[in-house]
């Protein structure tokens, strides 16, 4: 699993993750309750032959997941951790730390490669700012809502 995939999983959860059963923080739909047949009224006439079985109810179609604001999800993680003094809103290093991911230069270089960074992979401010923005943009492409200024 790539580093971006780990970031996405930490933010949106996956299969029972911290924010739901799917990437978008929504619980899977509970099975639709099956209707119970009404009791037959008491009849004085002889009972008719066995009634035909009722057609099975059509399975409920799960609603499409609604986009989740990754910033809200990250704020929720920060709140659960007691709002550590991290500047995750602008720093890729702090964002990765908040998500319990290794923020070493090697991992940031790998993330830069995954996301298509073409500049020098030297840990510069330019690279880190680009990475933070790219991560949020990719979260938007993955179905999350991101601030308008981060959209292409």
Image (tube, grey):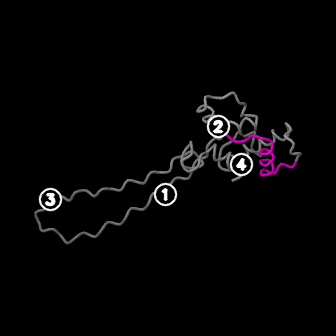
Q: Nearer the viewer, mark 3 or mark 2?
A: 2
Taking depth in this image into account, of 103 and 150 the one nearest to the observer is 103
Taking depth in this image into account, of 133 and 61 the one nearest to the observer is 133
Position above or below: 132 against 116? above
| Residue 63 percent location from the top left of the image | 52, 52
| Residue 98 percent location from the top left of the image | 67, 36
Task: Choose the circle earlier in sequence order: 3 or 4.
Answer: 4
- Quick one: SS at disc 2? helix
Does the magenta portion include 104? yes
- Quick one: SS at disc 3? loop
Dots 1, 2 in contact, CB < 8 A: no
* Residue at mark 4 to residue at mark 2: CA–CA distance: 15 Å
* Residue at mark 1 to residue at mark 3: CA–CA distance: 37 Å
Disc 2 marks which residue?
Answer: 74
Q: Residues within 10 Å of mark 2 (few under 14, many from 20)?
A: some
Disc 4 marks which residue?
Answer: 4
Task: Say which mark, if any, is on residue 42.
Answer: 3
Disc 1 marks which residue?
Answer: 61
Q: Residue at x 14, y 59 (%)?
A: 42
Q: Residues within 10 Å of mark 1 (few under 14, many from 20)?
A: few
Q: Nearer the viewer, mark 4 or mark 1?
A: 4
| Residue 135 percent location from the top left of the image | 74, 44
Highlighted range, magenta: 100-118
Q: Nearer the viewer, mark 3 or mark 4?
A: 4
* Residue at mark 3 to residue at mark 4: CA–CA distance: 65 Å
* Residue at mark 3 to residue at mark 2: CA–CA distance: 60 Å
């Amino acid at each position: 699993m790539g580093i971006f995939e780990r970031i996405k999983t930490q933010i949106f959860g996956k299969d029972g993750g911290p924010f739901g059963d799917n990437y978008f923080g929504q619980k899977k739909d509970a099975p639709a309750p099956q209707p119970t047949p009404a009791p037959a009224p008491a009849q004085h006439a002889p009972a008719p032959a066995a009634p035909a079985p009722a057609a099975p109810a059509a399975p409920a179609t799960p609603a499409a997941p609604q986009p989740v604001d990754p910033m809200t999800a990250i704020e929720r993680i920060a709140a659960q951790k007691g709002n550590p003094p991290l500047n995750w809103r602008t720093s890729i290093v702090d964002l990765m730390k908040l998500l319990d991911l290794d923020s070493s230069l090697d991992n940031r270089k790998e993330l830069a490669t995954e996301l298509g960074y073409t500049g020098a992979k030297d840990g510069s401010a330019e690279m880190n700012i680009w990475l933070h923005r790219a991560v949020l943009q990719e979260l938007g492409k993955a179905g999350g809502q991101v601030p308008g200024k981060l959209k292409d």
